[in-house]
Image: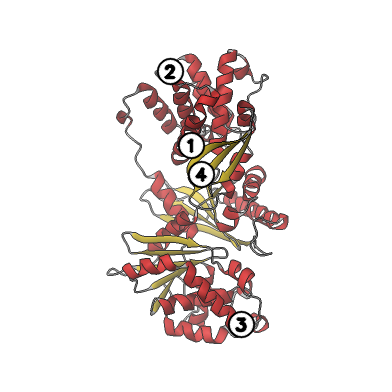
Amino acid sequence: MNSNDLRPNARRIAAIDLGTNSFHAVIVDVLPDGSFQTVDKLKEMVMLAEKGFSNRLSDEAMDRAIHALQKIKTLSTHQNAERIIAYATSAIREAENGGDLIQRAIDEVGIKINAIPGRMEAELIGLAVRHGVQLPDNRPSLMVDIGGGSVEFIIGDRQRFYHLSSKKIGVARMTASMVNSDPISREEIKQLQSYYEEQLRDVAQAFATHRAGIMVGSSGTMENIGMMIARREGKLQNLSVNELEFTSDQFFSLYDDLIDMSRKQRAKLSELDDKRIDLIAPGLVLVHYLLTTFSIKRVKISSQALREGIILRYIDKEMDEIRDMAIYDNPRERSVFELVNRYDWHEIHSRHVAKLCMLLFDALREQMELTENDRDLLEYAAYMHDIGYFISHKKHHKHALYIIRHSELLGFKEVEIEMMANIARYHRRSTPKMRHKYFKKLPKEIKGRIKKLSAILRVADGLDRSHYQNVRNLKVEKEGNKTVIKIETESDPELEIWGAMRKRSLLEEMLSSEVEICAEK
């Protein structure tokens, strides 16, 4: 069978991990029994933080990222992948212009990037490690994924996770901010150790409760450390890095040899990846700190990491049974949920957008002179706003309008269906215009209600730009002539602020007020 020949009854998907230093793609066939088999892989170096970690991605870094995505898209098309799932981590998540890169990926490559919070990244890595290596039966393991921007920590066993966290202590970030000497100085090592101690207090607390007997490392830095030790021990020839084990003493021996080397000396080591010559020191110090602090004697390597976790999450989601519609007594509610399920809706995102809509609606209801029925129609429109994706990403807002208008939604008057269809249609791109034929024909009073409700939906949708429910709560305050929406988030708020600010103009028009979106202090 050729690599691009699809296995019987399989679904071929591509998963992309958009890291700080590199983009990793894997193409797999998902089989009916829930397993998957790798078809192809591609790794592209992008170095998003080549000038250090700032709050902006450089134009050059974004160009490299788009070029890498184009190569991955070409490979995915050649291998007949029916779906591409791309997850971005800390470098894009934190950047104030990360949203610009995400939009460029959509416009120029046709790939939609999902910027996930750190805790979800840790969970997906934990799923991949648990899937890829044999974990001990009798006690938890400490799983560590050392990336360029962040390091994920998972304490868990074969059944559950006891701790999940993501820390901004990746090797590229630490090199840029704390390593200036060549070779790294003793003072810089002490500063790194102190910083690690400060950042990892919650990990240490969780470890004290769930003491792990082994550390499992994933991703490039840990894999390279494992391979260097194996070569020193004469063990690695054609051996797979997965399940590769070494002792803490073997690591300490490697550490002692490498930590005092200059860049020129490290560059002569054939077993050290070229791209890690400048970044290996903080990784070595971190592993040394973990093994020493937690008294761990054994280390194992997992070749599976975030990209395999993406696949496992996809499999789990796709194999869930469709919700029984009988739980809905209200015919309006039931018909809406029958419709969105029929069109494979983005349930978690759409429910969250609906929740944010309700928070905004309740805060602005009196000022905007809205009714309880307006509230219901807005909530239903929020559930349905993305169902146009079923047809195509391009113009999916217009596809949503068509689907809603031509569906037999029970319990609604014709004008209410028109309202929901138009509210959903205006969640992105253009605001309502008289030249739009379905909007133009409606009565003036209905047009006004559509503009008010779609203004709320646009901002709410922007507040879940990542599709990962980062906004936990919000409140609306008046500050003079300005309306300020203050958001509480789980992790960095920049992408949500960017998403909402670029979609606020219609709300400003409806409120006759400047609108500002900011993080709650």
Residue under the image location 64 percent in, 54 percent down: 71
Note whether residue 302 is visible. no
Q: Earlier in the sequence, mark 3 or mark 2?
A: 3
Mark carried by residue 467: 4
Q: Secondary structure under badge 4?
A: loop
Residue type at the position of mark 2: Phe
Residue under the image location 67 percent in, 64 percent down: 50
Alpha carbon separation for disc pair 4 and 2: 29 Å
Q: Earlier in the sequence, mark 4 or mark 3?
A: 3
Judge whether 26 appears above or below 398 on screen.
Answer: below
Circles 4 and 2 in contact, beta carbons < 8 Å: no
| Mark 4 surroundings within 10 Å by alpha-carbon count, few (fewer than 14), some (14 through 19), many (20 or more) | many
Residue type at the position of mark 4: His
Q: Position of residue 463 (x, y in %)?
A: 54, 41
Judge whether 228 appears above or below 423 on screen.
Answer: below
Alpha carbon separation for disc pair 1 and 3: 50 Å
Q: Secondary structure under badge 2?
A: loop
Q: Earlier in the sequence, mark 1 or mark 2?
A: 1
Which residue is disc 1 drawn over? 356
Residue type at the position of mark 3: Ser
Which residue is disc 3 drawn over? 185
Q: Earlier in the sequence, mark 4 or mark 1?
A: 1
Q: Earlier in the sequence, mark 4 or mark 2?
A: 2
Instruction: Name the residue nearer the viewer: 378 or 362.
Output: 362
Q: Secondary structure under badge 1?
A: helix
Instruction: Name the residue nearer the viewer: 172 or 69.
Output: 172
Which residue is disc 2 drawn over? 412
| Quarter where residue 174 is shown | bottom right
| Mark 3 surroundings within 10 Å by alpha-carbon count, few (fewer than 14), some (14 through 19), many (20 or more) | some
